[in-house]
Image (tube, rainbow, N blue to C red):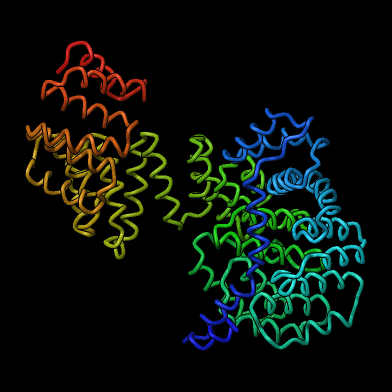
Amino acid sequence: MVEDQVIQTCSQIIICLKFIFFLFLLVDAREINAQKNILNKSPQYNATLTAGNILSWSFAEKQKDFKKIKDIINKTKENLTDLTSLKKAFFSSLIIGDWEQSLYFAKKINLIEPENLFVNLVISSEYFLNEKYELARLQVKKIKNSDFVNNYNEIIIVWMNLSEDQNKVISNFLETRECIPIKCLHQALITKVFTNNIEARKKFDNLMLTGMESLRLSEILIEFYNEINEENIVKKIIIDIGDNFADFNKIEINTKNFDSIINSSNGLAELYFNIAGWFYEKNMLEFAAYFSNISLKLRPNFKAQKILLASIYEKFNLNELALDSLKGINDANLYYLKSEKLKVQIFNKTQNNIELLNTLEKLVITFPKNQDLKILLGKSLHNQKRYSEAINYYTFVINHNLKTIDNNWDLYFSRGMSFERSKKWKEAEQDLLKALEINPQSAYVLNYLGYSWLERGINFEKALEYVTLASEILPDDGYIIDSLGWAYFLLGDYEKAIKILEYALKILPMDPTLNDHLGDAYWKVGRKEEALSQWKRVLIFKSDYEYKDNIDKKIISGL
């Protein structure tokens, strides 16, 4: 057995348990490959599904444009008859949480392929929500024999039986002595719901020994031990999660705001959340989204699950869906800070500067001791050219962390860049040198300081030394390679500059500054037509280029 081999080679019990947890969570590889193959196939042509719809659908899938896919499905769903097209429509609907469409296609697929994993989970969940428990259980039992069935069906069936007090099935499950983490978790939860806290205490104590770590598990443990008045254990858990999870909302622990598991619907949602989380950690995002949306159908306001789904959508660039998933997570919730930081990430990516700053400024007030938020706000202000305000936040963090600040070279680097952009070169140089003193191998600091010296016509030899070292550390960074080429340009070695700048442009062909620099180098060696071409490209790539007026003059008169 693979598990026996793992146990023999593990040297620490926590590592063993975590590894077996992964083995236990493995969904049948055949099932995964089958679903991937379906997603990679195009819908099949028939007389009513036009070639245009097929091409649009395939293109939308490549772009992960699920809104477009939803529109196409709505227009063509009555004409989808082949299994491939039905499956594509089903999974495309499930991934964005369109339950009605998912159920519609699941029922059609179920007639053709009755053992399909996700189809049966969707249909069984619908039966369960309509209190048709026997039909729900029968639907789950249809799933073809696989690792998923062996590992999870038992837990699913037990939670479903809990709705009808099927004592024998539940008791058999609870008597299992092995404490594989995911099973151990659900044994503890079912014991708490089905029996009493005395028996549940044994299960939760065992669960504490597994070494499992997650904010959701901590939430479950805090609630249980708080309920049985184990204040010292609760305090320890809070301290541990405060150390391990930077996004933990430390303002107030109020178990009234927790997502308690009080019935079988909550328990099933928890199980599907557990599975979704595992797929997310493995970067198998489509599968994580499928299980997440099934979980949320069973428990629509499940906060931990909403954040997980929002994180998946953010990675898909489905930013509106991500923000929608985060609704309802307020500042009294354990996950509030995590939710708001995810919003910040989305606002930054979508360049929604107003919402970005509003969110960060609110967070800085709400969490006055959180220095990371002040740094994030400083960087956002810097990006919006509000350099003086950015400097104030960086300075506050530096002054309030003097004992540990020497480990944070990036703070000096960030403030140094803001000083430099504010035309306060003396202060900027001091911060950049301090950052380099702390981290002499930082390619970005070496490059920024060296390039800044070159721009000011000072310290040429040292500047060349720094940008050369930076290019050796990060040889494929286009901006750093550009700095090296520009250094040789300023030193008058134009031929060498051209070779280096051309290489930089291969890495970042559409960057206006790099095209500008290469144009200057071409002009200096008499390659004037090529120089003009490079300068014109600058304005094509960025019509509002910072040095547009200078480019216009060069196009007319040269250097």
- Going 36% across and 25% down the picture, which residue do you hit? 541
Residue 254, image quadrant? bottom right
**x, y (%) of residue 293?**
72, 53
**x, y (%) of residue 251?**
57, 61
Q: Is residue 533 above or below residue 29?
A: above
Residue 17 horizontal side relative to residue 440, left or right:
right
Q: Is residue 19 above or below residue 354?
A: below
**x, y (%) of residue 395?**
32, 49
Q: How many labels, in total? A: 0
Of 99 and 454, which appears nearest the observer?
Answer: 99
Of 422 and 176, which appears nearest the observer?
Answer: 176
Q: Is residue 232 visible?
A: no
Residue 195 horizontal side relative to residue 376, left or right:
right
Residue 44 horizontal side relative to residue 490, left or right:
right
Quadrant of the drawing holding the N terminus: bottom right
- Going 27% across and 42% down the picture, which residue do you hit? 417
- Going 64% across and 31% down the picture, which residue do you hit? 56
Residue 198, image quadrant? bottom right
**x, y (%) of residue 410?**
30, 53
Q: Is residue 352 visible?
A: yes
Q: Is residue 69 above or below residue 22?
A: above
Quadrant of the drawing holding the C terminus: top left
Name the residue at the top extreme.
556
